[in-house]
Amino acid sequence: MLSVSFALSQRRPKDSRENILETKQFTVNIISESFIEAANSTSVESPADMNEWLLSGLTPAPSVLVKPPIVEESAVSMECELYSYQNIPDLPSVAPTATLVLGLIKRVHVREAFLGKDGLTLDPAELRPVARLGGVSYARMLEGFDLPKPSWKATKGVYEEIENGRKRDDS
């Protein structure tokens, strides 16, 4: 499962949001730094009937399980079906200002060149994914790191000390 959100503009809803709500299917494509300008060109507020593929120069490739295409240039693409959505209002107003979409991932496409040495995880140094933070702000991921999960056996004593300290403070 994954989530995506759409800010609702005063002008008109985003085409992507409208397409998801209408067709109940969508794709999510991880954007790499090498084609961020092309991907960004699709964010232009254009007429609804304009083909953003032509403007971007990116290549639509057929999906296997859903109708919307994936981006051929993307190292990772996910075919999704709409699970649910929620229109979210600002607290003081009644009008929604965003829509949160939850999608069930039905199929994942990954180019082998972007897998790590284990063949199971992505190599962020090769992928160089870019994330949109909001507005015109983006972020780059240039490297990953491993952080092992703590074990309960090693953590239990610390938890008990904290809990016992709280009980003494509450007395």
Image (cartoon, rainbow, N blue to C red):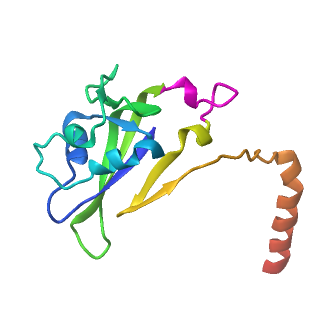
Between 70 and 156, the one nearer to me in the picture:
70
Of 64 and 81, the residue lying toward us: 64
111 lies left or right of 144? left
Task: Identify the residue at horizontal 26%, vertical 35% (top origin).
Answer: 24
Q: Do we see residue 18 in this rendering?
A: yes
Residue at 30% x, 22% y is 62
Left/right of residue 45 with respect to residue 28 in the rendered view: left
Residue visible at 32% across and 72% down in the picture = 91
Looking at the picture, does residue 65 appear above or below residue 138? above
Q: Main secondary structure of the magenta part?
A: loop
Q: Is residue 65 magenta?
A: no
* Residue found 25% across the figure and 25% down from its top: 67
**Residue 56: image x %, image y %?**
27, 42
Q: Name which quarter of the figure residue 107 lies in.
A: top left
Q: Is residue 9 above or below residue 64?
A: below
Q: Which residues make up the magenta segment?
A: 110-122
- Rendered view: 73 above or below 63: below
Q: Quadrant of the C terminus?
A: bottom right
Residue 58 image offset from top left, x and y in percent:
30, 36
Q: Is 38 on the left-hand or right-hand side of 21?
A: right
Instruction: Give coordinates of residue 115: x percent, y percent.
Output: 60, 29
Picture quadrant where residue 2 is located: top left
Q: Does residue 142 appear left or right of residue 65 in this picture?
A: right
Most foreground residue, 158 or 26:
26
Question: Residue 17, how many percent across, how many down?
Answer: 25, 47
